[in-house]
């Protein structure tokens, strides 16, 4: 017997309530991790079976993911994993370079003591992990750090955009399974362990500026940190993308 449904698109299975939000997070995580490749179909029936829910929360999750740009709906094919264009992939980096410094400046003006407590704790953990070479534990700490910093901006709209931009950048510029050769004349990739130590030192300096309420300093530090991070993304090839179409009518595109 399948899971029962409540009126708020929450599945009830085995005594557990599984919300559409949880299903959305699971599908998004699988898209970002590469479980579902760009262009692949996402059928409600198969997704419902995979996540142990009915098709109702899956349908709601797909609508949310389409609004975020991770999913697109094709005629006769239904929901599919989106294939960003070359221009959209490049724009992600440029938009982050503009918005992340703004978010840091707002955080310096609006943060709470609770935000600072979390940020300082994450910096302490991040530095410790980086210094001991435990690089595999750093990505979730980094995500938590930047999500908390975004929330400290005091702007739910800005925070949501920043979090979504980071997710989409991680997806579109996912690292290759094996190191790719660096073309002659290209910038050399930084040593991951050394860069991790530097990155968490930058996080610490940024938190200090936010704690002092120094918006200008926080903006400058965030701009420098973001540019270094985006430079590393630019050394990677984005996931298979569509060639950009130079068309006046862009109503069918999702950004």
Image (spheres, rainbow, N blue to C red):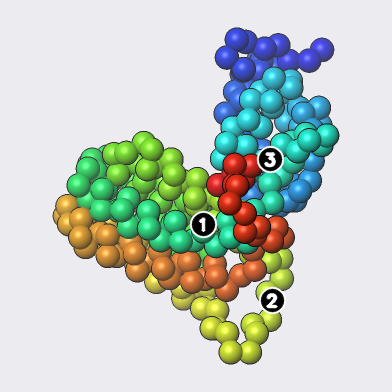
Q: Is residue 122 left or right of residue 38?
A: left
Cα distance, mark 1 to mark 2?
A: 22 Å
Graded by Cα atoms within 10 Å as few (under 14), some (14 to 19) or many (20 or more), the crowding at tag 3 reads: many
Q: Residue at x 40, y 51 (%)?
A: 145
SS for dot 3: strand
Q: Is residue 6 visible?
A: yes
- Does label 3 or label 2 sit earlier along the sequence? 3
Graded by Cα atoms within 10 Å as few (under 14), some (14 to 19) or many (20 or more), the crowding at tag 2 reads: few
- Does label 3 or label 1 sit earlier along the sequence? 3
Total labels drawn? 3
Q: Is residue 173 above or below residue 10?
A: below
Name the spot of residue 173 as percent of width and height, x first: 60, 61
Q: Residue at x 74, y 20 (%)?
A: 54
Nearer mark to the viewer, of 3 and 2: 3
- Does label 1 or label 2 sit earlier along the sequence? 1
SS for dot 2: loop
Cα distance, mark 3 to mark 2?
A: 30 Å
Graded by Cα atoms within 10 Å as few (under 14), some (14 to 19) or many (20 or more), the crowding at tag 1 reads: some
Spot the residue most to the front: 248
Residues marked 3 and 2 touching at CB (< 8 Å):
no
| Residue at image mark 2 | 180
Between 121 and 236, the residue placed more toward the observer is 236
| Residue at image mark 3 | 72
Q: Is residue 132 visible?
A: no
Cα distance, mark 3 to mark 1?
A: 18 Å
SS for dot 1: helix
Name the spot of residue 129 as percent of width and height, x first: 46, 62
| Residue at image mark 1 | 92
Q: Is residue 197 above or below residue 35?
A: below
Nearer mark to the viewer, of 1 and 2: 1
Q: Residue at x 64, y 49 (%)?
A: 32
Name the spot of residue 143 as percent of width and height, x first: 47, 51
């Amino acid at each position: 017997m399948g899971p029962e449904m409540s009126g708020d698109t929450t599945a009830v299975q085995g005594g557990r309530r599984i919300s559409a939000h949880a299903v959305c997070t699971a599908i998004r995580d699988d898209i970002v991790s590469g479980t579902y490749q760009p262009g692949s179909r996402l059928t409600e029936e198969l997704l419902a079976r995979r996540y142990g829910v009915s098709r109702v929360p899956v349908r709601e999750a797909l609508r949310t993911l389409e609004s975020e740009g991770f999913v697109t709906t094709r005629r006769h094919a239904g929901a599919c994993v989106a294939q960003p264009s070359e221009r959209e992939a490049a724009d992600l980096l440029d938009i982050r370079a503009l918005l992340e410094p703004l978010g840091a400046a707002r955080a310096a003006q609006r943060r709470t003591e609770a935000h600072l407590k979390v940020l300082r704790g994450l910096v302490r953990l991040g530095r410790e992990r980086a210094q001991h070479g435990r690089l595999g534990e750093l990505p979730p700490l980094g995500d938590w750090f930047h999500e908390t910093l975004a929330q400290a901006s005091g702007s739910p709209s800005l925070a949501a955009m920043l979090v979504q931009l980071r997710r989409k950048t991680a997806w579109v510029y996912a690292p290759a399974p094996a190191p790719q050769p660096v073309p002659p004349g290209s910038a050399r990739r930084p040593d991951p362990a050394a860069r991790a130590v530097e990155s968490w030192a930058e996080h610490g300096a940024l938190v200090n500026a936010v704690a002092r309420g120094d918006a200008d300093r926080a903006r400058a530090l965030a701009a420098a940190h973001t540019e270094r991070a985006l430079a590393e993304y630019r050394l990677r090839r984005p996931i298979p993308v569509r060639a950009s179409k130079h068309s006046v009518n862009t109503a069918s595109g999702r950004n």
